[in-house]
Amino acid sequence: MDKIVIRGGERLIGEVEVSGSKNATLPIFVSCLLSQGDNLFYNVPHLRDVQTIIKVLENLGVRVSEKNGVYQINATEISNDEAPYDLVKTMRASILVLGPLVARMKKATVSLPGGCAIGARPINLHLMGLEAMGAKIELRHGYIEAKADVLKGANISFDTVTVTGTENLMMAATLAKGKTTLQNTAVEPEVVDLANVLNKMGARINGAGTSLIEIEGVESLHAVEHTIIPDRIEAGTLMVAAGLTRGNIKILHCPLSEMEMVVHKLRESGMEIESEGDGVRAVGMKRIRSVDIRTQPYPGFPTDMQAQFMVLMSLARGLSVISETIFENRFIHVSELRRMGADVRIQGDSAIIQGVESLSGATVMATDLRASASLILAGLAAEGVTVVSRVYHLDRGYEGLDKKLAKLGANIKRVKEGD
Ligand code: EPU
């Protein structure tokens, strides 16, 4: 396994390009299960999670190929309706195939995802919605078995806002008989990108991007061409990198309009962030101000930016409070940041951070994607050498982050574990 070695202290300067969004690509690739013909996708990020969803689809008989970064996906023939444990355990988002498979194949067998590093992450709302649409669901030997001769439109209200839950049911409803109403839905840009793809395929979805989505079922869907939206979490991570190193970077393909809360909080911390021509300029200041945040579903502050923001706060003047309201165990990075000299206390769902003058390099690791990214950021700002191992997690969701940072002037390299 690779590890990343960083010698901190370099200012980041230059231009960097944001890749396509991971959390848009995953459901969009899955949505091909509902369509006939060759779908073509552009701006697909090269990530381990994308490779995993391709394996899940290929296991169902879907044909996937890639040429010069353009992905072609054809699910005209589906030969299998099972997503096995071995694949689902490596990526929970595999659960996204459940709704589309039942809609298209009348049945599906999908391994129940277990708990994961950041929390229990139940899928009860995905199952509740499919049952309301007439699916019979049984849990057997660790698998969800779902069957429905016909899925029928239904009125479904989510108790909790769920991103993949909204996506799963929205996809299933496109081929259901009649009208489905989804209430209290996730309004994330990735949900909107998926709805745009489904509508291009011939679906009749209204209201994506609001908390009420209405879907009029259709008989069949056809193939599309689509360019995946840029990754707002990667863009935010790069902004924090500039903030931590007193950097001055221009971020290309930056989805600024989808980052209002993150940008607001970064500006409050003292950063300058402004549109500039075809990109966004992010400039870090000598003095970082302490800012409180509370994670919320979109358009609130994203839980996927919480760990990165905490690194910035660990070097701020004064005390800040970060509350994590989405996942119950998303402070995995805290113990590693403490080893680098951060002063962080956990109290219930909050982290209380007393900014320190400097962090010091250390050997660290993390078992979650965003936690791993936060340790790389800490390494950029720390004195001395930081070694981040288990880079596997980083590669799940960031395309070449180490290379992009190196191009901006960071002293960072990837080496084989053991070297
Ligand atoms: N929840 C339930 N029941 C359900 C579904 C969710 O109680 O049936 C709860 C969860 O336990 C959690 C909350 O609802 O407390 C929100 O979870 P959500 O379902 O929205 O999360 P998700 O769909 O599993 C997606 C992203 C995550 C991101 C969250 C929150 C994808 C593939 N994953 O997960 O991304 O953190 O939404 O925004 O879109 C990441 O990229 O690092 C990542 C973890």
Image (cartoon, rainbow, N blue to C red):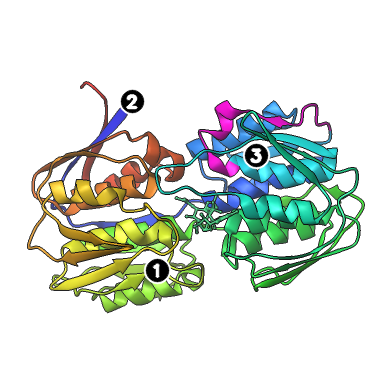
From this view, report whether residue 298 is shown above or below residue 367.
below
- Quickly name the residue at label 1: 280
How far across and how far down the image is residue 352, in percent? 21, 66
> What amino acid is labelled 1 in the image?
Val
What's the residue at 14%, 46% (across, down)?
Answer: 339
Disc 1 residue crowd, few under 14, some 14–19, many 20+, Cα 10 Å:
many
Label 2 or label 1, whichever comes before in sequence order:
2
Q: Is residue 310 left or right of residue 207?
A: left
Magenta part of the protein: which range?
77-93
Establish whether ligand 1 lies closer than 8 Å to the Cβ of label 2.
no
Query: Foreground: 335 or 279?
Result: 335
Label placed on residue 71:
3
Q: From mark 2 to mark 3, how far is it between C-alphas?
A: 27 Å
CB within 8 Å, label 2 to label 1: no
- Quickly name the residue at label 2: 1
Name the residue at the top extreme. Answer: 418
What's the residue at 22%, 21% (across, down)?
Answer: 418
> What amino acid is labelled 3 in the image?
Tyr
